[in-house]
Amino acid sequence: MAEAFDLDRAIRKVPDFPKPGILFYDITSVIANPPAFRHCIDQMVERYGQRGIQAVAAIESRGFIFGAALCDRLGLPLLLARKKGKLPGATISASYALEYGVAEIEMHVSDIPKGQSVLIVDDLIATGGTVGAVADLLRRGGARPVGAFAVIGLPFLSYQKTVGDLEVQTLIDYHGE
């Protein structure tokens, strides 16, 4: 079992970003803090190392950092879920609602491992829109999304309603102000 670590202290909170009324939880302060980052990756390995996951789908952009580190530790392929227009070649896409807008995400069709178990990784889950869209892309591509991991969860934004029965695990949850 990993030793206790105060992750909350390592997360920078930025009020009124990207617009007034939003409290932004800035994960870059965790990435810039080696013990905090190591704690996050250690926790991911502990939770998923023995779960039979065959690939990780990481969400742009900070999810790439956590997903890549997990894949390196577990020897798994990393699948990228990017904003529309950022991937060359044949892609599939899905639109989704954000806490503060609407967006579209894509994955390379050829990267989605048919019939395999895939964990979705992001830095933060708010409304669940991005995670739900990536789960949809994986299913449409023939893979099995088996869960989602985020360092930070905002359950007060009801992400579980959006992602349905997909298991979501987070390291720290914030419950609004």
Image (spheres, rainbow, N blue to C red):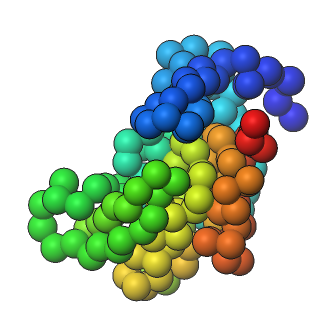
Viewed as shown, does residue 138 lie left or right of 35? left
Q: Nearer the viewer, residue 31 or 163?
A: 163
Residue at 31% over, 55% down: 82
Could you tell me which quadrant the C terminus lies in? top right
Residue at 12% over, 67% down: 89
Residue at 40% over, 76% down: 137
Residue at 73% over, 54% down: 155
Viewed as shown, does residue 80 lie left or right of 58? left
Q: Nearer the viewer, residue 71 or 67?
A: 67
**Residue 100 seen in the current view:** yes
Query: Would you place residue 68 above or below residue 145 in this image?
Result: above
Looking at the image, how many numbered discs can be counted on the residues?
0
Could you tell me which quadrant the N terminus lies in? top right
Query: Would you place residue 168 above or below residue 7 in this image?
Result: below
Query: Would you place residue 27 above or below residue 168 in this image?
Result: above
User: How far across and how far down the image is residue 95, in percent?
Assistant: 36, 71
User: How far across and how far down the image is residue 54, in percent?
Assistant: 54, 65
- Residue farthest to the front? 20
Query: Would you place residue 107 above or below residue 22 in this image?
Result: below
Q: Nearer the viewer, residue 47 or 133?
A: 133
User: How far across and how far down the image is residue 111, in percent?
Assistant: 31, 68
User: How far across and how far down the image is residue 46, in percent?
Assistant: 75, 44
Q: Nearer the viewer, residue 154 or 118?
A: 154
**Residue 45 seen in the current view:** no
- Residue farthest to the left? 89
